[in-house]
Image (cartoon, rainbow, N blue to C red):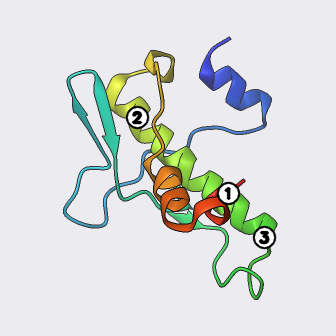
């Protein structure tokens, strides 16, 4: 089963890779590595959840917003390498940084 078939099984699909809103590349390939940058939660140009968590946005909506940003990252990776099935390993620098900064409180779901 391909990665995109697994996405479809979760009722998800990759959006169009977002166009940069600044002077950066959304994904850059260096040898066997792909780095992503500048991803937001806009899916095909539309941000579904906006506001402060606990006020205008529920924790569940914040979760979905983070998922939207991850889907954008995946769309950019696919654009850079042709297929998500070529991905061998994922490194999450954001999660590691949050844990280092906040200790156990930085370990998020």
| Figure quadrant of the N terminus | top right
Examine the rendered structure and indicate whether residue 90 appears above or below residue 27. above
Examine the rendered structure and indicate whether residue 37 appears above or below residue 77. below
Q: Where in the figure is residue 40, as x and y percent of width and height?
A: 48, 62
* Residue 74 falls left or right of residue 22: right
Front residue (pair 93, 32): 93
Q: CA distance from mark 1 to mark 3?
A: 12 Å
> Helix or strand or loop: what does disc 2 sit on?
helix
The reply to whether the C-beta atoms of the residues labelled 3 and 2 are less than 8 Å apart is: no
* Residue 62 falls left or right of residue 35: right
Residue tagged 3: 59
Q: Nearer the viewer, mark 2 or mark 1?
A: 1
Residue tagged 2: 77
Q: Residue furthest top?
A: 1
Residue tagged 1: 108
Residue found 48% across the figure and 32% down from its top: 90
Residue found 32% across the figure and 49% down from its top: 26
Residue found 25% across the figure and 66% down from its top: 22
Q: Nearer the viewer, mark 3 or mark 2?
A: 3
């Amino acid at each position: 089963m391909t990665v995109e078939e697994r996405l479809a099984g979760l009722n998800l699909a990759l959006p169009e890779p977002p166009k940069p809103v600044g002077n950066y590349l959304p994904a850059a390939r260096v040898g066997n590595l792909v780095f992503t940058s500048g991803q937001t939660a806009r899916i095909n140009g539309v941000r579904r959840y906006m506001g402060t968590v606990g006020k205008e946005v529920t924790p569940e909506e914040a979760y979905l917003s983070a998922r939207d940003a991850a889907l954008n990252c995946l769309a950019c990776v696919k654009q850079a390498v042709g297929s998500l099935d070529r991905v061998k390993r994922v490194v999450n620098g954001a999660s590691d940084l949050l844990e280092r900064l906040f200790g156990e409180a930085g370990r998020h779901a």
